[in-house]
């Protein structure tokens, strides 16, 4: 089949949540299908990443988002009723490219990852369309509104309401909707009943992320992620303010490395705290995982599966996380992952791992075993193959002749 894959970002390098998923999905689909990627780019420099899809995608069409025009569109959306996050990404050049592709290459199906780029597939109602929500972005904005202060609280709450209405419209119009965890499925069915829905989970590259046998720095904690992303910023700021002091009271040499690109000002300032290192962008997070003792995921705003947790567990790191983070997985508590929601409980679990070598060794082995059993990419994406076959049943190959 000929497939158009629409993504919010260039799906390479696979170094953040949505890019990890889209990269592996494209690579998986390209084994059996002709995949053409249409995506936005985070600035002109991101356009250079298109080459990372060579050998998988038949073509990649990317349009850089103009930050100034995006802000103007967002301001205009306050008055016209559109979700701001949808309006900000409404780049006309990408719409023209997709329309041209539909006219000349007529895909058998269009797969869309992320609701804020569903707009680029909306005009093509005669083509089977699959909407991969991954998780409901409206619930993220709702959670952000609960933690924000005025006036952002009002803007975030407005965005949550508008985006939920938009998500409902898209789910009703598209042939199939996808989410990434059973918990997201429950939320979806509660908020958007009646839509055709399946779960397609995330995976982890078990060959790329594996224990390397590096010497561990004593009492070393690590967190990875894009460090301008609001839930990550909230997580590390809370950890450093309330959890780390409790840990260091019991284990004075305990340290935290915050490893990830684009650290916000609040994150950069955490480097002033004794024992805290903020790396900024690194070419490879694996050395930081390899030499750390425990991975921490103190996310208080979390939806869906956290790729950072799967990657840490694949490298054999025991994880301490919040219940919100853990519920995105299918891994039992204790199988490489410990759960705590209060600062006191979170610190207690970390200290237990740092002090008990036998427990840490068992948790390390269990972490790797858990992701091997549950999160291999091919096993997860078999569900995507089934959904695609169902959505295109009786239509694939009949829309137009394909060029050789």
Image (spheres, rainbow, N blue to C red):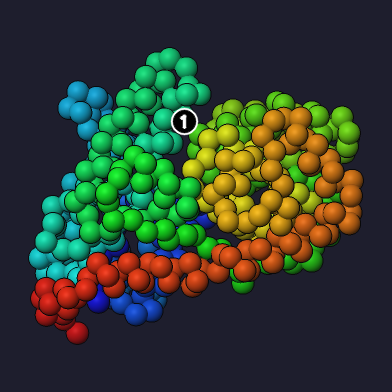
Question: Does the rendering let one see residue 53?
Answer: no
User: Which corner quadrant holds the N terminus?
Assistant: bottom left
Q: Quadrant of residue 130?
A: bottom left
Question: Does the rendering let one see residue 266?
Answer: yes
For numbered disc 1, what is the local secondary structure? helix
The image shows residue 324 at horizontal and vertical percentages of: 57, 40
Asked if 64 appears above or below 83 in the picture, the reply is below
Point out the residue furthest to the bottom here. Answer: 404
19 horizontally vs 96: left or right:
right
Asked if 348 appears above or below 157 in the picture, the reply is below
Residue at 61%, 72% (x, y): give it: 207
Residue indicated by mark 1: 143
Residue at 38%, 79% (x, y): give it: 31
Asked if 149 appears above or below 220 in the picture, the reply is above
The image shows residue 299 at horizontal and vertical percentages of: 59, 38
The image shows residue 244 at horizontal and vertical percentages of: 76, 32
Q: Residues within 10 Å of mark 1 (few under 14, many from 20)?
A: many
Asked if 19 appears above or below 219 in the picture, the reply is below
User: Which corner quadrant holds the C terminus?
Assistant: bottom left
Residue at 19%, 23% (x, y): give it: 79
């Amino acid at each position: 089949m000929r497939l158009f894959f629409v993504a919010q970002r260039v799906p390479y390098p696979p170094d953040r949540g949505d890019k990890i998923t889209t990269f592996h999905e494209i690579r998986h689909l390209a084994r059996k299908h002709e995949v053409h990627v249409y995506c936005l780019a985070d600035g002109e420099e991101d356009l250079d990443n298109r080459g990372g899809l060579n050998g998988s995608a038949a073509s990649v069409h990317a349009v850089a988002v103009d930050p100034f025009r995006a802000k103007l569109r967002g301001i205009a959306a306050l008055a016209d009723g559109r979700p701001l996050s949808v309006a900000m990404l409404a780049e006309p050049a990408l719409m023209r490219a997709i329309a041209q592709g539909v006219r000349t290459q007529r895909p058998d199906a269009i797969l869309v990852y992320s609701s804020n780029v569903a707009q680029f597939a909306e005009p093509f109602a005669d083509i089977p369309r699959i909407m991969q929500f991954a998780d409901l972005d409206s619930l993220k904005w709702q959670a952000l509104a609960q933690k924000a202060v005025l006036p952002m609280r009002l803007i975030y709450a407005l965005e949550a309401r508008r985006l939920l209405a938009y998500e409902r419209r898209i789910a009703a119009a598209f042939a199939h909707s996808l989410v990434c965890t059973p918990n997201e499925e429950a939320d979806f069915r509660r908020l958007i009943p009646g839509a055709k829905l399946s779960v397609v989970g995330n995976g982890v590259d078990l060959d790329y992320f594996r224990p390397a046998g590096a010497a561990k720095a004593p009492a070393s904690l690590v967190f990875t992620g894009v460090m301008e992303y609001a839930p990550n910023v909230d997580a590390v700021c809370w950890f450093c303010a309330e959890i780390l002091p409790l840990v260091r009271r019991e284990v004075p040499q305990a340290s935290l490395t915050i490893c990830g690109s684009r650290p916000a000002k609040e994150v950069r300032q955490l480097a002033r705290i004794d024992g805290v290192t903020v790396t900024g962008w690194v070419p490879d997070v694996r050395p930081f995982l390899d030499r750390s003792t425990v991975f921490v995921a103190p996310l208080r705003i979390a939806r869906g599966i956290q790729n950072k947790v799967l990657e840490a567990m694949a490298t054999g790191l025991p994880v301490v996380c919040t219940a919100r983070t853990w519920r995105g997985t299918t891994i039992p508590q204790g199988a490489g992952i410990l759960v705590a929601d209060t600062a006191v409980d979170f610190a207690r679990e970390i200290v237990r791992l740092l002090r008990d070598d036998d427990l840490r060794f068992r948790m390390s082995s269990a972490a790797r075993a858990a992701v091997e059993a549950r999160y291999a990419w091919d096993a997860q994406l078999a569900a995507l193959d089934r959904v695609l076959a169902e959505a295109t049943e009786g239509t694939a190959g009949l829309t137009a002749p394909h060029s050789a």
